Image: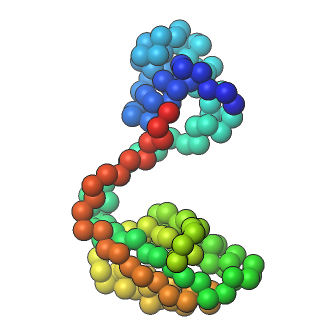
């Protein structure tokens, strides 16, 4: 889908406040409410807008421990890779999982209640996966920038 300037404005405003009413959004981007609704609907149907979400404070819900985990695999055959990927997809502690180049095969962003819960995640789950050779943990001391918005 080719995005025009108004599409990009719609995306910018919805990323800042997805609860904005269609009437307010239309006013902000200079369209009639019906034209704005059609453009927004088109962005949704084409997959440009993937979903609408609330941004939750991890600390406010008791999740104060965050780590970046660099995972090296011992086996790269399809069976073990699929097992690893499926396991990452279903674990609620794993917020993000990226296959990467470099020394580590995968990078995870993990969120837990505390260090004890993280240790349970490592020993009771991650290290029990047959494909995992090793994991290096970097504990997040302070969040400098966490931006879920895509620059449009």
The answer to whether 42 is drawn above or below residue 28 in the figure is: below
**x, y (%) of residue 120?**
40, 86
Task: Count all numbered tags in the image, as a single digit.
Answer: 0
Q: Which residue is drawn at 35% across and 52% down?
A: 146
Q: Which residue lies furthest to the front in this view?
A: 102
Of the 4 image quadrants, the one containing the N terminus is: top right
The quarter of the picture where residue 112 lies is bottom left
Q: Which colour scheme is used?
A: rainbow
The answer to whether 77 is drawn above or below residue 20 in the figure is: below
Q: Residue at x 39, y 34 (%)?
A: 16
Q: Which of 97/62 is in front?
A: 97
Q: Residue at x 32, y 60 (%)?
A: 58
- Please indicate whether residue 79 sits to the left or right of residue 54 in the image: right
The quarter of the picture where residue 113 lies is bottom left
Q: Which residue is drawn at 54% across and 82% down?
A: 72
The quarter of the picture where residue 18 lies is top left
Q: Which residue lies furthest to the right in this view?
A: 78
Note whether residue 96 is visible.
Answer: yes
The answer to whether 54 is drawn above or below residue 64 in the figure is: above
**x, y (%) of residue 132?**
57, 86
**x, y (%) of residue 5?**
54, 20
Note whether residue 89 is visible.
Answer: no
The answer to whether 128 is drawn above or below residue 149 in the figure is: below
**x, y (%) of residue 60?**
26, 58
């Amino acid at each position: 889908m080719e995005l025009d300037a108004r599409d990009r404005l719609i995306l910018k405003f919805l990323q800042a406040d997805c609860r904005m009413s269609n009437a307010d959004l239309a006013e902000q981007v200079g369209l009639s409410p019906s034209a704005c609704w059609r453009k927004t609907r088109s962005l949704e149907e084409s997959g440009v807008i993937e979903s609408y979400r609330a941004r939750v404070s991890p600390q406010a819900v008791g999740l104060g421990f965050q780590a970046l985990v660099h995972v090296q695999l011992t086996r790269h055959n399809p069976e073990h890779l699929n097992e690893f990927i499926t396991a990452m997809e279903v674990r609620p502690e794993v917020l993000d999982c990226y296959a990467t180049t470099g020394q580590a095969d995968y990078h995870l962003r993990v969120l837990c209640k505390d260090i004890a819960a993280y240790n349970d995640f490592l020993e009771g789950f991650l290290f029990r996966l047959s494909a995992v050779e090793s994991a290096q943990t970097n504990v997040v001391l302070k969040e400098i920038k966490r931006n879920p918005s895509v620059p449009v």
